């Protein structure tokens, strides 16, 4: 996502707006309207996960984002031939490859880039050859960073789900341990020349913490912001998230 010079870009994940729409089987609320509003309110890009089962975002939504939204699209996708074909046709700014299991409620755990190297390599290559920026959604583990290097992925998105769960549960020691894993994975990736993004389960507080890591360049956030929008509106929720991120960036200078 290359919209401006913010030290940490904010990508809004609109999947949950599509979930709400699909719950009634109508056209409202329109996730593309949410995407446009988010960009007007200062989000730097839009993230949408085209799942194999199309449970929230649909093919038509991806086409509409590309046509109607004046900001980069980060398309989340499983590592399948079908999704790679779609991505190569649609040409979003970026594709974030995520693991996908049909029975899961949301993306659980990171992609096993190390174990799945041989299957991933041709898909990553096809996406890169199509001019798409490839990001791998991985757990903060050295072997996964190493695999991302071997796959020549320009970006990794570190899975913050476990950290956010532990923080929310008030388990300070476990949260600290997981934060240190994220911090050292971010360092390792940046040293290898890989751009570092992070996401999953972030709220205002945990976004501040992640933004305090000097290597982090982008946060992708959905559920919390869409939830907050119910109470304060989407624009104000995005503005407050930018403030939370700026607070984290300011902490970098103090380290
Ligand atoms: N990044 C990735 C790769 C994801 O799969 C998700 C969830 O769809 C998110 C970020 C956003 O997570 P959340 O909705 O919990 O903010």
Image: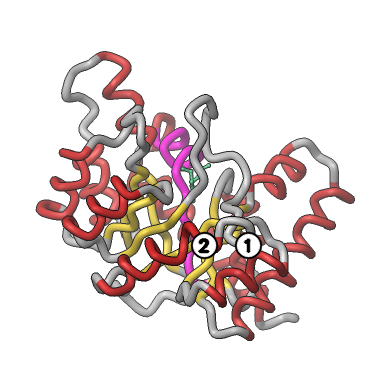
| Left/right of residue 128 with respect to residue 159 in the rendered view | left
**Mark 1 or 2, closer to the camera:** 2
Q: How many labels does the image show?
A: 2
User: Which residue is painted at 69% across and 69% down in the image?
Assistant: 185
Q: Is mark 1 on a helix, strand or loop?
A: loop
| Magenta-colored span | 217-229
Q: What element carries label 2?
A: helix
User: Which residue is painted at 53% across and 28% down in the image?
Assistant: 105
Hey, which quadrant is residue 209 in on the image? bottom right
**As drawn, 105 above or below 157:** above
User: Which residue is painted at 24% across and 60% down in the image?
Assistant: 92
**Residue 32 x, y percent position in the rendering:** 20, 42
Image quarter hosting the C terminus? bottom right
Residue that label 2 marks: 118
Residue that label 1 marks: 114
| Left/right of residue 234 with respect to residue 121 in the rendered view | left
| Left/right of residue 63 with respect to residue 47 in the rendered view | left
Check disc 2: other Cα within 10 Å, few if <14, some if 14-19, many if 20+.
Answer: few
**Residue 84 x, y percent position in the rendering:** 30, 54
Check disc 1: other Cα within 10 Å, few if <14, some if 14-19, many if 20+.
Answer: some
**Residue 10 x, y percent position in the rendering:** 42, 60
Is residue 220 magenta-colored? yes
Residue at the extreme front: 118
**Within 8 Å: ligand 1 and the Cβ of disc 2?**
no
User: Which residue occupies the foreground of this view, 249 or 44?
Assistant: 44
């Amino acid at each position: 996502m290359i919209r401006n010079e913010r030290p940490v870009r904010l990508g809004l994940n609109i999947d949950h707006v599509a979930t709400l729409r699909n719950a009634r089987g109508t056209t409202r609320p329109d996730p593309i309207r949410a995407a446009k509003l988010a960009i007007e309110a200062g989000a730097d890009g839009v993230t949408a996960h085209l799942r194999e089962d199309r449970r929230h975002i649909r093919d038509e939504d991806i086409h509409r984002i590309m046509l109607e939204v004046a900001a980069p699209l980060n398309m989340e996708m499983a590592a399948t031939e079908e999704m790679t074909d779609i991505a190569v046709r649609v040409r979003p700014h970026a594709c974030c490859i995520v693991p996908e299991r049909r029975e899961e409620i949301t993306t659980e755990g990171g992609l096993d880039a190390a174990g799945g190297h041989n299957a991933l390599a041709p898909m990553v290559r096809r996406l890169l050859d199509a001019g798409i920026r490839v990001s791998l959604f991985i757990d903060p583990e050295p072997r996964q960073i190493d695999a991302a290097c071997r796959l020549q992925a320009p970006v990794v998105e570190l899975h913050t789900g476990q950290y956010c769960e532990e923080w929310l549960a008030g388990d300070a020691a476990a949260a600290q341990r997981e934060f240190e894993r994220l911090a050292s994975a971010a360092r390792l990736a940046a040293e290898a020349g890989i751009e570092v993004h992070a996401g999953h389960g972030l709220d205002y507080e945990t976004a501040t913490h992640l933004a305090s890591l000097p290597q982090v360049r982008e946060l992708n956030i959905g559920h919390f912001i869409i939830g907050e929008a119910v109470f304060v509106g989407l624009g104000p929720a995005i503005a407050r998230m930018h403030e939370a991120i700026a607070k984290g960036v300011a902490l970098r200078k103090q380290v």
